[in-house]
Amino acid sequence: MEILLIIIAVIFILIIILYNRLIQLKIRCNNALAGIDNQLKRRTDLIPNLVEVTKGYAKHEAETLVNIVNQRSHSLSEKAKQNEEISKNVKSLLALAESYPDLKADKIFANLQIELTGTEDKIAYARQFYNDSVQYFNTAIMVFPNNILAKILKFEEREYFKVSDEDKENVSIKL
């Protein structure tokens, strides 16, 4: 009888440990996704400042970015698509410095350009961290014995932050 109680207690403790690990990984995925949102918000806050500086030099490109700044998306695939569209336009705007020497020499533009480039790097890191977190979570819910508990508790695979094939092509900049 005592052995049966010990076995039940060990199984119960094991289930608690597995459940807590799955919850930790799920929370890590949510945190990583929030990190992407945070960096996208940072970029959204920076772009209007960059646009104001460049308005006198490149009115059309500035208006394009203002329109993009006003876009909001909710699903992960919409965020990925919006992220790639904004990245393309940011690259185009930053390339304007080559065509407008006065803009390139402007300290405000140069500082904003550095901030925006840093933000783009942080966004790339946040996307990678999210995808790594999703990989750990998805692996955890697929391996034995976690897969049994995950199936019972209806844990589902998380979606990776994906870039479409057309977004992987080089950006064409037309001035």
Image: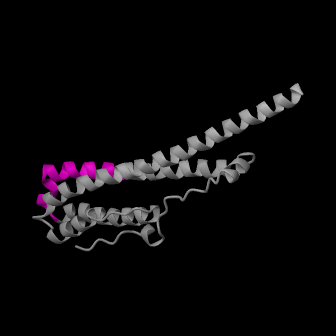
In screen coordinates, is 142 left or right of 103? Answer: right
Quick check: 38 left or right of 101? Answer: right
- Where the N terminus falls, by quadrant? top right
Which of the 4 quarters of the picture holds residue 16?
Answer: top right
Q: For the point 38% across and 52% down, which residue is it?
A: 37
Residue 115, position as x, y percentages in the image: 26, 48
Q: Which residue is painted at 18% across and 54% down in the image?
A: 49
Q: Does 163 lie within the magenta span?
A: no
Q: Position of residue 151 (x, y in %)?
A: 69, 53
The answer to whether residue 149 is seen in the rendering is yes
The colour scheme applied to this rendered structure is: one colour
Task: Depth check: give the residue in front, 133 or 56.
Answer: 133
Q: Quadrant of residue 19?
A: top right
Residue at the front extreme, as displayed: 1
Report the residue at 52% width, 53% height from top: 131
Q: Looking at the image, is 16 positioned above or below residue 6?
A: below
Q: Is residue 99 above or below residue 150?
A: below
| Residue 110 placement, left or right of 84 | left
Question: Is the residue 5 above or below the residue 162 in the image?
Answer: above
Q: Looking at the image, can residue 121 be seen?
A: no
Where are the magenta residues, as a range? 100-120
Query: x, y percentage for residue 168?
Result: 45, 67
- On screen, residue 120 versus residue 24, left or right, reads left
Residue at image x 59%, y 51%?
A: 135
Check the picture and name the quadrant holding the C terminus: bottom left
